[in-house]
Image (spheres, rainbow, N blue to C red):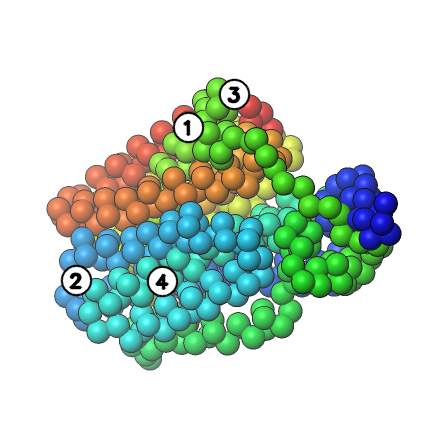
Amino acid sequence: MMPGAQAGAEASKAIANQGPALDVDAEGWVRLSVLAVGLCFFINAIDGMNVLLMSYLAPSLAKEWGLASTTLGIVFSSALVGMAIGGLCIAPLGDRLGRRPLILAALFLMSAGMVASGFSASVTQLIVARTAVGIGIGAVLACMAALVAEFAPPRRRNFAVGLLQGGYPIGATATGFLTAWALTHHSWRSILLFSGFGSLAFFPLVFWLLPESASFLMHAQPRNALQRINRIRRELGISPLPALPATVRAEGRPGVLRALLSKKLRHDTLLLWGAVFFGFIVLYSIVSWIPKLAIDAGLDPKSSIYAGAIYNLGAFAGTVLLSVLANRAGLKPLIVGFLLAAAALLILFGGVVMPVGAVLGTAFAIGVSLQGGFNGLYPLSACVYPVRMRSSGLGWAMGIGRAGAVLGPLLSGYILSLHLPLVVLFATLAVPLVIAALCTGAIRHAVH
């Protein structure tokens, strides 16, 4: 055997014994781990800012352009359509081109879309710009989750992935409080432009500091792959590899969709798709419309933006709470309980006249229960699928569910245009949550 081939075989054996390309010390964090997780957290916070900002600005935009609720629903849904396109069509390119370049391209695209939103002169231009924002966000999410799971210490991996998800509502919360102040001094256009250029300002930092996935480098083996892998391993305190392993091509495996719908997995796959679909209907109805709904519930415009921010603060708290409780109680019953509690709180929010403090408190509780319960579907999917299919299973579930994300704001906008009592809308939204809870409870293999 030639020396290079022998080294490659030895490396293959070593990696087979170690498992993944990176085997981070289970006891703690190192600088590169913190850097990778921290950068992805802030990118996800930018995602939350860029998606939710439009809901905060919707009352001002509707007033200036004279837009009906149905038209606003289309504006909201355009970003969600883009997220579906980005997740299903663009994100898979990360397996071929690398996680890092795709994250950079997606960050640039969403930032440029925000700038274009600020310069939009018509609803059509705004819809196109918001679609571009959504494509960037949809493409970046899967790659960031892969990076965070890879660079976090194994014993802290679930915490790190949960922290990543928490970046989204944190960004939305900060944006809400800042927008409430900024709207008294600046136009909605200026706020969108500030958001877009602010996101672009973060781009050089990500370009300079974000590492590539060592697992991708191991699989794709681009130029200088061994040097790049060993540089990452040294920064993580792992011994370098003598050579790259021989590449292995997967042959004879069934297609992703065929595997997900195989006899063994079909039952749980369809139920998981149903839970995500119906959960998305409600989730994006609330995050898109909550400032306007708070106005209809009796709040002034500034307080309504605070209601949106407080909802997202509750969303972060709910995500963390469910992650902590899942170590002590079953994940599946927790998700069911959170979703049913959210359904009851929605009816309370729409059907009972409350003072300002109670409205804000209920908005916080809805965030805790709704977002906390929905985010539990991410780790639940890991219980449904084996390791080799988890990314595909989650990707397809979220991709299918985006149809609900698009439908939700449109449905809510239509109901609002009928000028029915507010409780009718919230009672309508409670129904999909109950269905999502039932789908979750009926999943067989996810027992944790």
Q: Which residue is mark 2?
A: 67
Q: Position of residue 164 (x, y in %)?
A: 57, 53
Image check: 40 left or right of 6?
A: left
Determine the CA span between mark 4 and mark 1: 30 Å
Taking the spot 38% from the left edge, 39% from the top edge, the residue there is 400
Taking the spot 50% from the left edge, 53% from the top edge, the residue there is 93
Camera-nearest residue between 39 and 245:
245
Q: Which residue is mark 4?
A: 132
Determine the CA span between mark 4 and mark 2: 21 Å
Q: Is residue 356 visible?
A: no
Taking the spot 53% from the left edge, 46% from the top edge, the residue there is 319
Judged from the image, the secondary structure of the residue bearing numbered disc 3 is loop
Determine the CA span between mark 3 and mark 4: 38 Å
Q: Which residue is mark 3?
A: 264
Q: Earlier in the sequence, mark 2 or mark 3?
A: 2
Determine the CA span between mark 1 and mark 3: 12 Å
Image-quadrant location for residue 323 = top right
Q: Earlier in the sequence, mark 1 or mark 3?
A: 3
Q: Position of residue 127 (x, y in %)?
A: 26, 62
Camera-nearest residue between 397 and 118:
397
Taking the spot 75% from the left edge, 56% from the top edge, the residue there is 29
Q: Nearer the viewer, mark 1 or mark 2?
A: 1
Q: Position of residue 125 (x, y in %)?
A: 24, 67
Q: Earlier in the sequence, mark 1 or mark 2?
A: 2
Q: Earlier in the sequence, mark 4 or mark 1?
A: 4
Q: Mark 1: which amino acid? A: Leu
Q: Earlier in the sequence, mark 3 or mark 4?
A: 4
Image-quadrant location for residue 403 = top left
Image check: 195 left or right of 158?
A: left
Q: Which residue is mark 1?
A: 270
